[in-house]
Image: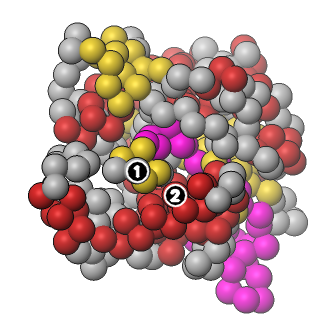
Amino acid sequence: MSSAPRIVVLAGGVGGSKFVVGVREAARRRWPDAAGGTRAEITVVVNTGDDLWLSGLRLQPDVDSMIYALAGVNDTARGWGRTGESERVAAELHAWGAGWPWFTLGDLDLGAHITRTGWLRDGATVTEVVDRLASRWPLGVRLLPMTDAEVDTHVTAAQGRMHFQEWWTRHRAAIPVQGFDWPGIERSVPAAGVLDALVAADVILLAPSNPVVSIGPVLTVPGIADAVRTASGSVVGVSPIIAGAPVRGMADACLAAVGISATADAVGRHYGPRVTGGLLDAWLIGEEDASLAADLGTDGLRAPVRALWMRDLDTSARLAADAFDVALGSE
């Protein structure tokens, strides 16, 4: 493609944010502009199923992870939150018996949560709030929430229903669950700009995010999966599973809960090829899973084998560039 493409990424979680940083860098290198950015238009549709209310504040973990990573202020050692963080306010909340003692809120992070909650209370939409938060730094991409509706992820376990964050953070996904749901999501609509971006996209990328609780909620918002399925641009997914294990986090526990094996081919079949009504034109799998490519091809899903580990900016950018090549037919 001679002109710079319009790229849409569906993403969530820390792995998704690392991939998006790679997408931005790869686009800068391939389609640079005079200001040091890129001529490519990059839109990221971010999962908001992880959102929650806590101590009167609205938290958006995936949105914040995406903003912090793109701004270069994320704590790469802990894997979440801001670098240089302190936790005095969290300690005081816990001393009062407020919040969740196992869910730490950093002081800088709390500044974002307070700001977000104030804007929401003043009547701003989630889309407007995300745009305002993202405008603090020159991120180089447009961030859109999947929906303006509150559709927080819940899990059903033998102990009862609980918010996803309790299962994920407090119990470390160790409690068996029967499934995940997003109350009210069937009545939600995509946030303004999401469907237009998908229709106009030359490239649509499914980040190597958790298929169940990061990409799953995005595709469950009515209209988004259909827009991906019928898009004129190429749709390429990147496997979050390498050699039978999640790249990051506890995606295997989520997959097991919905009856999907934690393997690259099983997740690829979960999304499915567009030629048979699924979502994907191609599914990038790791070099460690090269033996799975032929069977996926037999099922109608092209599975290029690439190096998937994102160890630093260069390897993340290389993975994104590989996805561009596959999507644009220049591999």
Can residue 216 be seen from the camera position used here? Answer: yes
Q: Is residue 27 left or right of residue 245?
A: right
Q: Is residue 110 left or right of residue 41?
A: left
Residue 206 pos. (x, y %): 59, 41
Can residue 74 be seen from the camera position used here? Answer: no
Question: Which residue appears farthest toward the bottom when viewing the image?
Answer: 34
Q: Which residue is drawn at 61% across and 25% down?
A: 185
Which quarter of the rendering shows the N terminus? bottom right
Q: What stretch is highlighted in magenta?
A: 23-52
Other-residue count near label 2 (Cα within 10 Å), few / some / many at <14 / 14–19 / ≥20: some
Q: Which of 37/45 is in front? A: 45
Q: Distance between the residues labelled 2 and 1?
A: 8 Å
Q: Which residue is drawn at 51% across and 67% down?
A: 115
Q: Which of 191/150 is in front? A: 150
Give the total of numbered labels: 2
Q: Is 7 inside the magenta-drawn segment?
A: no
Residue under pointer 1 = 56
The correct choice, above or below, for 132 with respect to 50 in the image is below
Disc 2, SS:
helix
CB atoms of marks 2 and 1 within 8 Å: yes
Would you identify the image quadrant in which residue 224 lies?
Answer: top right
Q: Which amino acid does label 2 sit on?
A: Thr
Residue under pointer 2 = 117
Q: Which residue is drawn at 45% across and 76% down?
A: 72
Residue 111 pos. (x, y %): 41, 70
Disc 1, SS:
loop
Q: Which mark is residue 29?
A: none
Would you identify the image quadrant in which residue 225 lies?
Answer: top right
Other-residue count near label 1 (Cα within 10 Å), few / some / many at <14 / 14–19 / ≥20: few
Q: Which amino acid does label 1 sit on?
A: Gly
